[in-house]
Image (cartoon, rainbow, N blue to C red):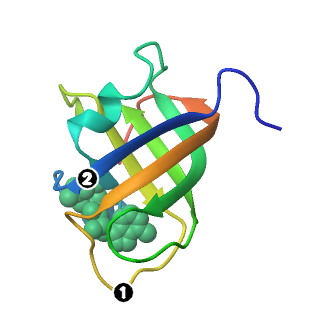
Amino acid sequence: MIEFPFPYLTTGTIVHGCGRGSKELGCPTANLDASSIENLPSEIDEGVYFGWAQFLTNNNDELYKLVASVGTNPFYKCKVKTLEVHLMHNFESDFYGEKLKIVLLGEIRKMTSFKDA
Ligand code: ADP
Ligand code: MG
């Protein structure tokens, strides 16, 4: 069941981040451009969320389960809040520049830091 205040809807173009999702952590996160955060309610907690994603730009109408992070990645002490999305699917290639529509359906946990990567 979807509980208040969900769902949250937004869209964004996939931009380059620091590249550590796949290289350092083994989990690529498609970083969405700043407008994707601006379209979320400003009171949204920094944390990890689940939901669904769909591409708007590559003639692929598949729905993908997602896990998303909203926040400043405190372990890496980033200054800017980002929305980063891991799609639960093995893709054959990168898809920078594509546009994603996402719906966040619930929260998994609040943003936190860890003692190592
Ligand atoms: P960056 O710091 O540039 O975001 P990442 O290491 O986090 O780099 O990798 C993210 C990129 O990997 C995405 O922009 C996308 O092009 C690609 N990618 C491949 N598979 C996935 C996936 N399952 N979920 C998210 N991004 C993926
Ligand atoms: Mg990333």
Residue 75 appearing in the image: no
Q: CA distance from mark 2 to mark 1?
A: 19 Å
- Residue 19 coordinates in the image, percent (x, y): 19, 59
Q: Nearer the viewer, mark 2 or mark 1?
A: 2
Residue extending farthest bottom: 92
List the residue tagged with mark 2. 13
| Label of residue 92 in the image | 1
Please rate how many residues cluster around mark 1, counting C-alpha atoms within 10 Å: few if below 14, some from 14 to 19, many from 20: few
Secondary element under disc 2, as helix, strand or loop, is strand
Nearer to me, 33 or 112: 33
The residue sitting at 27% across, 75% down in the picture is 94
- Residue 52 coordinates in the image, percent (x, y): 58, 54
Which quadrant holds residue 2? Answer: top right
Nearer to me, 117 or 81: 81
Please tell me in which quarter of the rendered image ligand 1 is found. bottom left
- Residue 22 coordinates in the image, percent (x, y): 31, 66
51 relative to 48, above or below? below
Nearer to me, 66 or 21: 66
71 relative to 65, above or below? above
- Residue 86 coordinates in the image, percent (x, y): 45, 58
Please rate how many residues cluster around mark 2, counting C-alpha atoms within 10 Å: few if below 14, some from 14 to 19, many from 20: many
Is residue 27 toward the left or the right of residue 21 in the image?
A: right
State yes or no: Cβ of the residue under disc 1 lies below 8 Å from any atom of ligand 1. Answer: no
The residue sitting at 32% across, 37% down in the picture is 36
Q: Amino acid type of disc 1?
A: Glu
The residue sitting at 22% across, 35% down in the picture is 34
Is residue 66 toward the left or the right of residue 77 in the image?
A: right
The residue sitting at 47% across, 45% down in the picture is 68
